[in-house]
Image (tube, rainbow, N blue to C red):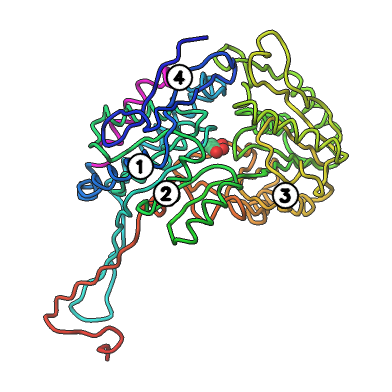
Amino acid sequence: MAQSKKYLNYIGGRWIPAKSGKTFPNINPANKEEVIGLLPESGSGDVDLAVKAAEKAYGEWRLVPPPKRAEYILKASLLIQKRKEELARLMTREMGKVLRETRGDIQETIDMGFYVAGEGRRLFGQTTTSELKDKFAMSVRMPIGVCGLITPWNFPMAIPSWKIFPALVCGNTVVFKPAEDTPLSAHKMIEILEEAGLPKGVVNLVHGGPSTGEAIVRHPRIRLISFTGSCEVGKLVAEHCGKVLKRCSLEMGGKNAQIVMEDADLNLALEGAVWGAYGTTGQRCTATSRVFVQEGIFEKFKKMFVERSREIKIGDGLKEGIEMGPIINEVQRKRVHEYVEIGKKEGAKLEIGGKFAKGKDLDKGFFYEPTVFTEANNKMRIYREEIFGPVACLISFKRFEDAIRMVNDTTYGLSSSIYSKDVNFAMRAIRDIEAGITYVNGPTIGAEVHLPFGGVKNTGNGHREGGETAIDIFSEWKSVFIDYSGKLQKAQIDVD
Ligand code: UN1
């Protein structure tokens, strides 16, 4: 067994173990014998310590001018940029996705840092008129307090950056719990923020599993929860936050669709669907899991897609030429496989895959074959539920209107895509698809950080990360009226 280093929580600017003294292992999903490190198993006592540290730091941090707050974010982003390759390699080891993709994850973190650092000199409010003489009106953004951030394993650094950076620039302090499966990327990110000189207690890192997350959600002095993960857990978070009126922003699943019209460039549509379905081993909330293909080209496209699925090179993401890494852990792999079994029972036709991937190196990890179903319909669970693995359904449709109806026939609404050379179809898809993101002639994955990211229906609760909208999550509006008339002026009354 490879050496396993012990990692610590970061609370109030100190690296300390969990009160319990217990640890949990961080395992390489491409080689389950490789324990990358041991992480502190934190409980509510550790969370409470972190909240105390974050509260203490908040008093001063909220008064630091935003351009100065932004400087720390910029410095950290520049350090991440310098260490991009090293960080990407570590991320592939703990998460499994191929190096090309972990480089992308780190790049998305850098992009977010650069973007949010600029926000330090904006954080714009409004200045406006008053209905009364000698009176001035404006709105300003205020911080909220201690924010609890809970993140998933599929984007181990990018998703934390979507939350940590905007929270900080707005003047909040943070208690951050990364996913159990990818704690090392989070550790590195916090180490870098420390190196950038971030004052003690502004960001606190608490490792652990679901009970640690629950302690954060339930902590009465955490004012805001930002959660990315499954719909199932998101609903529990929302339930508690609803009861105690805690602010909460949720980013959850998807059942994303790509439409391929008969007039599309088929090779381009194929590459898009393959990348959308198998990128990150299908473990993106933006992954393509339903591909709607117009009937005249269905058979041809199906052949192309199945053929391409057969050719996907599976293996350790650190190796040259590998296109698809493992699934994150055994529980998830079994869950994916269960869906495949359900699909077969429901009467869908398995065209290829549907098995644990076998082979000398593959047996060591949680690998799964690229899997394609046809003859799936909206009664089936594989058509309706998020699988979070390399499984795609190819579905044929007659007319454009049918495709839209089928695409929208889901409880989710994150990402979507249409391949067509006809601008009329493209514009109508943009108008008619119920989703937070629509791509034209591009796959369902690949959102950029300066635009709002999120979805409709059960994908979220109305917030958008990324872009200016991330700032809305992490700040409160205050309206300010300044009366310089020297007398009592009554709004709505002294107006004639
Ligand atoms: C996710 O799947 O949770 O748009 C996030 C994309 C990435 C982010 C995905 N930039 O696919």
Measure the alpha-carbon separation of dots 3 and 1. 34 Å
- Badge 4 is on which residue? 37
- Badge 2 is on which residue? 470
Segment colored magenta: 69-90
Measure the alpha-carbon separation of dots 4 and 3. 42 Å
Snapshot quadrant of residue 490 = bottom left
* Amino acid type for the residue under numbered disc 4: Gly
Of the two numbered discs 1 and 2 on the same chain, state the one appearing first in sequence: 1
Q: Secondary structure at mark 1?
A: helix
In the visual, does 274 lie left or right of 135?
Answer: right
Q: Examine the rendering and report whether any part of residue 342 can be seen.
A: yes
Q: Main secondary structure of the magenta part?
A: helix
Mark number displayed over residue 116: 1
Q: Nearer the viewer, mark 1 or mark 4?
A: 4
Nearer to the camera, 61 or 376: 61
- Badge 3 is on which residue? 407
